[in-house]
Image: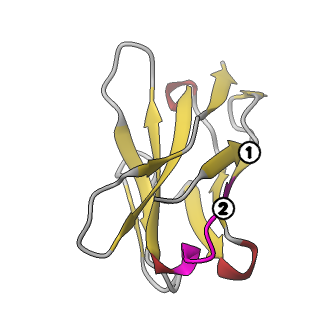
Amino acid sequence: QVQLVESGGRLVQAGGSLRLSCVASSRTFSNYYMAWFRQAPGKEREIVAGIIWSGDSTTYAASVKGRFTISRDNAKNTVYLQMNGLKPEDTAVYYCAGRLRGGTFDSWGQGTQVTVSS
């Protein structure tokens, strides 16, 4: 497992932008597939975006495609989520998570709150 710490969440107006960061403690960070999840009140946790170890391949939930961008800097042990065109329905606690190839997401951060006002 790797320890993860998210930051960057705050209150923002609809249409605004935020960049979330997630710093990992492990020197083996580059071995991990990394993802951002979110959980809104009363809803299931959902995956928002994922990125492979090299950063060459990414995936997005349909609800955020074209607005959010996931990236990583393995030299800094950090994964980012750039969020543009934010909507009130993006309001949630955002978590970063990691898994090794073939494994499950067993490393989670504590979450960072994103609130989008209309």
When asked about the image quadrant of residue 102, the answer is bottom left
Residue nearer the viewer, 81 or 85: 81
Q: Amino acid at mark 1?
A: Ser
Dot 1 falls on a residue whose secondary structure is loop
Q: How many marks?
A: 2
Residue depth check, mark 1 versus mark 2: number of the one nearer the observer: 2
| Residue 12, percent from left and from top | 76, 29
Using the image, tell me which numbered label, if any, was put on residue 17: 1
Residue at left offset 62%, top offset 56% = 81
What residue is shown with label 2?
25
Residue at left offset 44%, top offset 15% = 41
Locate residue 106 relative to residue 8 in the image: left or right.
Answer: left
Quadrant in the picture for the C terminus: top right
Magenta region, residue range: 22-30
Dot 2 falls on a residue whose secondary structure is loop
Q: Earlier in the sequence, mark 1 or mark 2?
A: 1
Locate residue 23 relative to residue 60 in the image: left or right.
Answer: right
